[in-house]
Amino acid sequence: MNVRKLSVNKACIFFAVLLLVAMGTVSAALYGLTQNITAVWYVLLFGIFVLVCAVCFMVLVRRKLAMFSDAFCSLMDDMLSGNMQPKQTVEEESLFYKIEYRLNRLYEVMQENKNGIAQERADLQELISDISHQVKTPPIANLKMINSTLLENEVPVQKQKEFLTAQASQLDKLDFLMQAMIKTSRLETGVISLEKKSQPLYDTLAAALGGILLNAEKKQINVQVDCPENLVVSHDRKWTSEALFNILDNAVKYTPEGGQIRVSVESWEMYVKIDIADTGIGISEQHQGAIFKRFYREDIVHDVDGIGIGLYLAREIVTLQGGYIRVTSEVGRGGSTFSVFLPRQ
């Protein structure tokens, strides 16, 4: 007998016939041994009672299986269609409830993954759109114009040098943009993971300051630093230095000649606070939340070199380390102060 092909109905009939045969055999054997018809009847009645109980049990089990099968199929159909709604089950401790509960959890996980993938696609589409816009305007447009001018017109040597210098400047901007976008995309997609370890903050801050001192000197900006040399903080030195450099670089760009930048570090119980204060043009309160958006730049600073990604990248780096950035500023009154908070541990 092939058990795999045996249906429930056939199985019930088979066990019923088997029970009847067993009852007949036991009754015949009992009558042959005792010659007592009353005892045989008792055995037959007991066998019939057992058979009726078995039939009722099988009917109940079959009904439960049919109900569970219908509910299970309905649940699977809802999962496939995406219209699944949470259901309340009375039999909270039954096997059916346990299976349904786990299917609901599986559906929730699948939906979370689906939503996560959709969000990642939307972010990727936005990133591609941003890259396309930033690359085309103005670097690619300027490079095409310069190249077309040099190819189609007879340009004096002096003018050629000017055009080539402008071309080199646009190529530098394009290279900076691509490097910034690579860093951003790697952080957002988790390709690069930050490795925090306890180390002096002074060295990290010094590395960030090293990148802006030359430009600050050209604009005669006085840079003051107040940071304890023995202050140890758990952080990723490379990426934290990148974040601080981006904030400092903005401070240099938007601080007029002869201005001042002050960097001060305070050690709190839970956080280390790094204040970067400048004497620049300031940021209006209505724009202070937007400056951390990717590629955001205010209209009044469009004449200053930049692509509007530095603060966005800085916030991403600090946030990934469990910290946050706060800005206080007011247009025309003493510049801006960016406060970076890094957790002590």
Image (spheres, grey):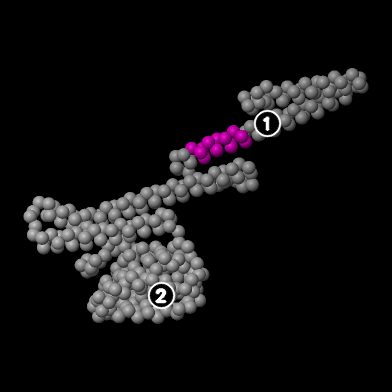
Residue 299 x/y as whole percent: 22, 66
Direction from residue 11 to residue 312 in the image, left or right: left
Question: Callout 1 environment at 10 Å: few (<14), some (14 to 19), or many (20+)?
Answer: some
Q: CA distance from mark 2 to mark 1?
A: 74 Å
Q: Label 2: few (<14), some or many (≥20) within 10 Å?
A: many
Tell me if residue 71 is in the magenta stretch: yes
Q: Which residues are magenta?
A: 64-77
Specify the amino acid type for callout 2: Ile
Q: Relative to 274, does residue 130 appear above or below in the rendering? A: above
Horizontal and vertical percent position of residue 311: 34, 66
Identity of the amino acid at label 1? Met
**In the image shown, does 215 or 40 lie closer to the viewer?**
215
Eyeballing the image, is 281 above or below 15?
below
Q: Which residue is mark 1?
A: 58
Pointer 2 residue: 274
Residue 15, percent across and down? 72, 25
Left or right of 55, for residue 293: left
* Residue beneath the point at 23% across and 78% down: 257
